[in-house]
Image: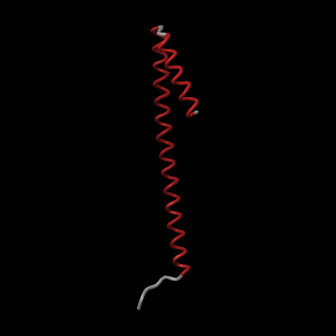
Amino acid sequence: MENKKSYTDMMKASAMTRKKHAEKSVLDIYIDMVIHESILTTRRADLLEAIDAALDCKDETLFMKLTDELTQLSCHYG
């Protein structure tokens, strides 16, 4: 005797598979967001520290370059 699933059973299984896949995708998006936020925060802190050092050394060209980078970073990522 063959063990065949009914149409209802197949639809339930399909819905559960789609739901698990959607949950996995949301989790992947959340992980990417956390990683990118961490990278952004670190880069911003590094730029601010370098800007302070440029000010201490009175290096105007380096200061302008670093502030431009910080401005671009803020424009692109908020």
The extreme bottom residue here reads: 1
Q: Nearer the viewer, residue 23 or 69?
A: 69
Q: Residue 64: image x %, image y %?
A: 52, 15
Say if 59 sits above or below 72 in the image.
above
Q: Quadrant of the N terminus?
A: bottom left
Percent across and percent down for residue 12 are 54, 74
Q: Is residue 21 above or below residue 62?
A: below
Camera-side residue of 45 and 5: 5
38 up-or-down from 28: above or below: above
Q: How is the image coloured?
A: secondary structure
Name the residue located 49 percent from the left edge and 20 percent from the top edge. Answer: 66
Displayed quadrant of residue 76: top right
Is 1 left or right of 9, judged from the image as shown? left
Q: Residue at x 48, y 12 (%)?
A: 61
Residue drawn at point x = 50 percent, y = 62 percent: 20
Where does residue 27 sit, x and y in percent of width and height?
50, 52
- Figure disc tally: 0
Picture residue at 56% right of the left edge, 79% below the top: 8
Q: x, y percentage for residue 77?
A: 55, 34
Pick out the residue farthest to the top. Answer: 58
The quadrant the C terminus occupies is: top right
Rendered position, 23 above or below 70 = below
